[in-house]
Amino acid sequence: MTLLNHLKEINLYNNDLEEIPKQIFTIQNLQKLYLDDNKIKVIPHEIGQLKKLKFLSVVQNGLVTISEKIKELKFFTTFCCLYDNKLDAASIEIIKKLGEVLKG
């Protein structure tokens, strides 16, 4: 187990990220992930590896697609995707089934 596995919250706000760094998906205890103000278009299927994730914020990214794997996260309660996100129809259906969704 690495020291990163003790992290419960990560804020990668405003880093010009085009994708979620793959290392994030190995952090077993991650509960909150802030990815606001980046350039992330896709929430990949690896999101399902974050078994303890409760909160995900991708505000102002231009997000287009969300993997269905997010629905498998049993602790997941809040998804924020406000401003400048252009979700496809399948992703809109996915977020309708999630807990609290803050979108715009």
Image (cartoon, helix red, strand yellow):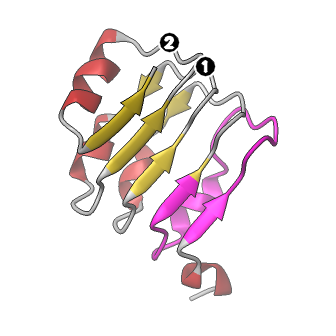
Q: Residue at x 30, y 19 (%)?
A: 92
Element at label 2: loop
As for residue 14 lying within the magenta part, the answer is yes
**Residue carrying label 2:** 86
Q: Residue at x 43, y 49 (%)?
A: 47
Picture quarter containing residue 9?
bottom right
Q: Which numbered circle lies on residue 79?
A: none
Q: Is residue 65 above or below residue 88?
A: below
**Residue carrying label 1:** 62
Q: Is residue 102 above or below residue 89?
A: below
Tell me: 46 left or right of 77: right
Q: Residues within 10 Å of mark 1 (few under 14, many from 20)?
A: many
Residue type pointed to by label 1: Gly
Quarter of the picture containing the N terminus is bottom right
Q: Residue at x 56, y 37 (%)?
A: 58
Q: Nearer the viewer, residue 38 or 67?
A: 38
- Are the residues flagged by discs 1 and 2 in contact, CB closer than 8 Å? yes
Magenta stretch, residue numbers: 9-33
Q: Residues within 10 Å of mark 2 (few under 14, many from 20)?
A: some
Picture quarter containing residue 88?
top left
